[in-house]
């Protein structure tokens, strides 16, 4: 199979610096290098220190640019990765389309508002391209399947504690719940929401259930979310964004072991960021140039913008 010529705009944390000096593959640059279906042909960042770090590490020898237009003008790119802020995405997508670049992997949150999302979908679909947003928990089909199976009872409510950038980290959880409750042509909706500086409340109306999800913003040096999903007979705990998952009885344990005395069992599945990102790139290569309903994976982005637009 011919390798897919790929380029990255944005060499920050998820673009590359998470992996700088480490033997990890948590970033877009590393995943492209490691996946034999792709060829990294160029990279761009307005911050020269990030470009210098990529060159110094010596993992790849490619042209680098400080201006994205120069990179797009100078290379025949088949897949463009946007590891940039939401506000920067629209102008890059629009310019890319004038250069016959029509396949994208984009960091979340996707674009700045719902009008931009609808416009981008229409433009990319009209040239038979695709857009994938990096929600690694929902690209890892094995994790998503196990998580769906853990939602065997109706959800009563969800509590989540979000650190770091509130919207950027909360949208991972919102997308996970959205994708877990979606069926073909039948998706959950946000039917009420309230957003404040330090906390938020969202009502999910799924095909067979309705429940509230409460988000609390906490101060921490680590970007993560901790989640408590309440069912009639038990509670599901997700630590470190799903790196550890527990099922706890709602009944008190006389020995008061964990979670304020709740009887707790660690489940046999968990989330691995490197595996999730690798799954996104595997999906991209396996479906490159093929027809698929890629737009359905973007539906949660509309609700995320609706949710955080209310003050």
Image: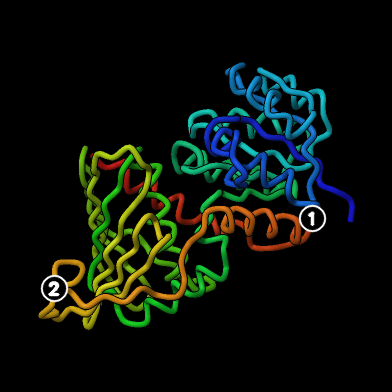
Q: Label 1: how many residues lie within 10 Å, few (<14), some (14-19) or many (20+)? A: few
**Image x and y of residue 294, in percent:** 63, 58
Task: Give 185 or 130, whichever is nearer the viewer.
Answer: 130
Q: Are marks 1 and 2 in contact (CB under 8 Å)?
A: no
Vertically, is 128 above or below 109?
A: below
Residue on which the image places disc 1: 289
Vertically, is 128 above or below 166?
A: below
Vertically, is 70 above or below 145?
A: above
106 sits left or right of 309 in the view:
right
Q: Quadrant of residue 97?
A: top right
Between label 1 and label 2, give the one nearer the viewer: 2
Residue on which the image places disc 2: 256
Q: Quadrant of residue 9?
A: top right
Quarter of the image where the N terminus is located: bottom right
**Image x and y of residue 230, in percent:** 24, 72
What residue lies at 37% left-to-right and 82% top-to-bottom?
Answer: 152
Q: Label 2: how many residues lie within 10 Å, few (<14), some (14-19) or many (20+)? A: few
**Image x and y of residue 223, in percent:** 37, 43
301 sits left or right of 10 in the view:
left
**Image x and y of residue 79, in percent:** 74, 42
User: Helix or strand or loop: what does disc 1 sit on?
Assistant: loop
Quarter of the image where the C terminus is located: top left
User: Helix or strand or loop: what does disc 2 sit on?
Assistant: loop
């Amino acid at each position: 199979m011919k390798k897919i010529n790929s380029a990255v705009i944005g060499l920050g944390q998820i673009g590359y610096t998470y992996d700088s000096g480490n033997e990890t593959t948590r970033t877009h640059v590393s995943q492209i290098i490691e996946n034999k279906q792709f060829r990294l042909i160029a990279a761009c960042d307005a911050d020269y220190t990030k470009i210098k770090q990529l060159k110094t590490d010596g993992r790849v020898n490619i042209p680098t640019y400080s201006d994205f237009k120069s990179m797009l003008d100078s290379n025949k790119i088949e897949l463009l990765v946007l590891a940039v802020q939401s506000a920067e995405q629209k102008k890059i997508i629009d310019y890319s389309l004038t250069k016959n670049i029509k396949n994208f992997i984009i960091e979340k949150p996707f674009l700045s508002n719902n009008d931009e999302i609808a416009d981008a979908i229409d433009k990319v679909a009209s040239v038979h391209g695709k857009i994938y947003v990096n929600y690694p928990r929902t690209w890892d089909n094995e994790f998503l399947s196990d998580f769906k199976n853990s939602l065997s009872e109706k959800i009563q409510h969800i509590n989540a504690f979000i650190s770091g950038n509130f919207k950027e980290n909360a949208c991972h959880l919102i997308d996970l719940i959205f994708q877990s409750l979606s069926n073909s042509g039948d998706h959950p909706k946000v039917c009420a929401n309230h957003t404040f500086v330090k906390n938020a409340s969202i009502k999910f109306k799924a095909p067979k259930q309705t429940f509230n999800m409460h988000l609390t913003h906490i101060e921490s040096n680590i970007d993560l979310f901790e989640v408590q999903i309440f069912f009639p007979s038990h509670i599901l705990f997700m630590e470190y964004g799903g790196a550890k998952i527990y099922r706890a009885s709602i009944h008190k344990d006389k020995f008061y072991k964990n979670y304020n005395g709740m009887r707790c069992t660690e489940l046999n599945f968990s989330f691995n960021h490197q595996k999730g990102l690798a799954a996104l790139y595997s999906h991209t290569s396996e479906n490159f140039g093929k027809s698929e309903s890629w737009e359905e994976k973007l539906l949660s982005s509309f609700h995320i913008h609706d949710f955080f637009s209310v003050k």
